[in-house]
Image (cartoon, rainbow, N blue to C red):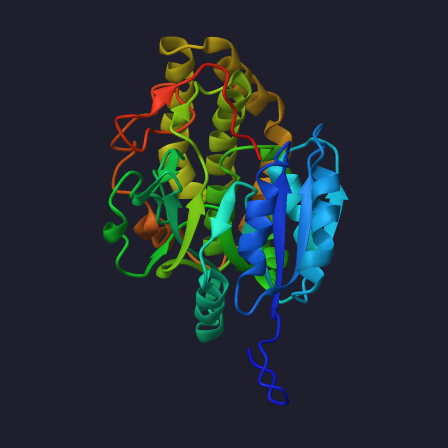
Amino acid sequence: MTDPMTGAATAADVTVVIPTYNRARDLPATLAAIAAQVPPPRAVTVVDNSSTDDTQAVVEGLAPSLAEKGIALAYRRKDPNGPAAARNLGWREADTAAIAFVDSDVSLEPGWLSACGAALAADAGLGAVGGKVVYAHRPDLLNCFGGEIGPIGLAWDSLEGEPVAAAARARDVLWANCSALLVRRDALAAIGGFDEAFFYGYEDSDLGWRLTLAGWRVRVIPQASVLHRVGREIGKAADAILFHSGKNRLRSVLTNWGPLRLTLYGPPALAYGIADALLRGPRRPKGRALVWTLTHLPQTLARRRAVQATRRVGDGAVAALMAGRFFPKRRLHGLRRRPADAGALPVAGADDRV
């Protein structure tokens, strides 16, 4: 936008919400890229999941430089209960028309905010807009361009490891990665935001699924691009990640499918979880995920009733946006993420929590 009196760029009606945990070294680059957007967002809120490094000092030290750009930078510290709860805290405190969720290891390329904002402004049916997420260490390769999900709830990044040129056309998707996603605040309020029971993993695919059920569309556009500053070194998935991934996949299936599709896909979704726990280690976190699903079934069914009450479209529309297969083409094989190239090395004990 431009001020008609002065001709100067005015701030977009956007609050950027950054969930973070022990990323003091990453935040300056993330905030610098946000400050370079034209127009800049009106506000940025960093929500800290109880970091033990100097995150607070770093954020407070950068506040004056962002203020010079007309951006109000706020710091919020919360209990360490995950990025889903952190994002909810941030958007619920915001008073802007749109919320940009940006992870603390992501750098927005110039024009990301204006491109996503223009897409939202041009189409009242869009609830969320994302773009290309590119590996910072391999800027010729995509980390993702939207997301895919199969009928039993397994979700994965679309076009992962493909050349950037593969993301050539805008398209509607069931979900897009929350590492960089612009969402209407009204859409978030309509569905209650993120499911905080997820803690970590699948919270973005679940959000997109519920936005779609509520009648909103999710879209990815090639004009918007970000750099994901993950390294070549890839560690094994920690037990906590396996636990949350297992329970969250099942909770999403149990919550979001309508009665007929749940009857069809619920049993194989559970069967896959049991087989995965029995046949592929580590068994303990996967077994804990199954136990959690059983013990929290009353709460999950209560949430299901609430989600189904917001439904505005049928499961056919959801299924049309789903992947044509149950599993991704490349399996994770116990890693946190798939290698972007042959030089990626597994490193024990690494963790990429935000």
Where residue 28 appears, as percent x and y from the top left, is 60, 45
Q: Residue at x 36, y 27 (%)?
A: 268
* Above or below 275: residue 255: below
Q: Which one is nearer the viewer's eye here, 184 or 318?
A: 184
Q: Which one is nearer the viewer's eye here, 84 or 342?
A: 342
* Above or below 223: residue 246: above
Q: Which one is nearer the viewer's eye here, 202 or 7?
A: 7
Query: How many labels sit on residues?
Result: 0
Q: Residue at x 55, y 77 (%)?
A: 1
Where residue 191 appears, as percent x and y from the top left, is 59, 53
> Quadrant where the C terminus lies?
top right
Q: Which one is nearer the viewer's eye here, 167 or 263?
A: 167
Q: Is residue 203 left or right of residue 170?
A: right
Where residue 247 appears, as percent x and y from the top left, is 52, 26
Whether residue 191 is visible: yes
Whether residue 176 is visible: no
